[in-house]
Image (spheres, grey):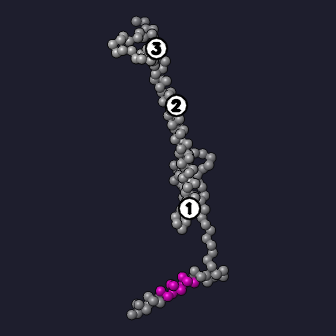
């Protein structure tokens, strides 16, 4: 019975303290407004993004999680840079493939083909090598 009475008194004290804190026992009568956190964009505007830049992004918490506008803006920026980077990579790969085809094929690329582009028959003799022999 003593324990029950102690718990009831403790509950009344806690409820009273919370009520005073919420209603404001101070001079202004209310709790001061907390300044809302704002997203400060750590993504560099003057250079391409790096992995460390993306890992450094931290969004301020709100009552329901993150502010959707902040997350959407950061993701849009990252997506735009990735699309730009992918386009540049595709452009460079195409240029490299063209350069490799030219280097491997060289000027004699169509040597075994006829005038109309048809390949010579398998049994037909190979065209003579037009390069001069090295003293043989």
Region rendered in magenta: 11-20
Q: Residue 17 magenta-drawn?
A: yes
Q: Secondary structure at mark 1?
A: loop
Residue assigned mark 1: 67
- Is disc 3 surrounded by few (<14), some (14 to 19) or many (20+) residues within 10 Å? few
Q: Are marks 3 and 1 in contact (CB under 8 Å)?
A: no
The correct choice, above or below, for 92 with respect to 8 in the image is: above
Taken as a whole, is the magenta stretch helix, strand or loop?
A: helix
Mark nearer the viewer, 3 or 1: 3
- Is disc 2 surrounded by few (<14), some (14 to 19) or many (20+) residues within 10 Å? few
From mark 2 to mark 1, how far is it between C-alphas? 43 Å
Earlier in the chain: of badge 3 and badge 1, it is 1
Residue assigned mark 3: 115
Q: Position of residue 28 (x, y in %)?
A: 66, 80
Q: Secondary structure at mark 2?
A: helix
Q: Position of residue 56 (x, y in %)?
A: 54, 55
Residue assigned mark 2: 95
Horizontal side of residue 123 vs 11, given as left or right: left
82 vs 116, nearest the viewer:
116
Residue extending furthest bottom?
Answer: 1
From mark 3 to mark 1, how far is it between C-alphas? 68 Å
84 vs 120, nearest the viewer:
120
Earlier in the chain: of badge 2 and badge 1, it is 1
């Amino acid at each position: 019975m003593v324990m029950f009475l102690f718990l009831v008194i403790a509950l009344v004290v806690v409820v009273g303290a919370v009520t005073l804190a919420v209603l404001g026992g101070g001079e202004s009568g209310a709790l001061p407004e907390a300044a809302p956190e704002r997203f400060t964009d750590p993504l560099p505007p003057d250079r391409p993004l790096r992995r460390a830049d993306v890992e450094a992004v931290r969004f301020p918490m709100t009552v329901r999680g993150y502010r959707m506008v902040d997350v959407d803006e950061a993701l849009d920026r990252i997506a735009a840079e990735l699309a730009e980077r992918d386009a540049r990579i595709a452009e460079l790969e195409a240029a490299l493939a063209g350069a490799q085809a030219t280097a491997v094929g060289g000027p004699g690329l169509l040597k075994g083909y006829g005038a109309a582009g048809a390949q010579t028959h398998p049994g037909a003799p190979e065209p003579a090598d037009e390069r001069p022999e090295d003293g043989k």
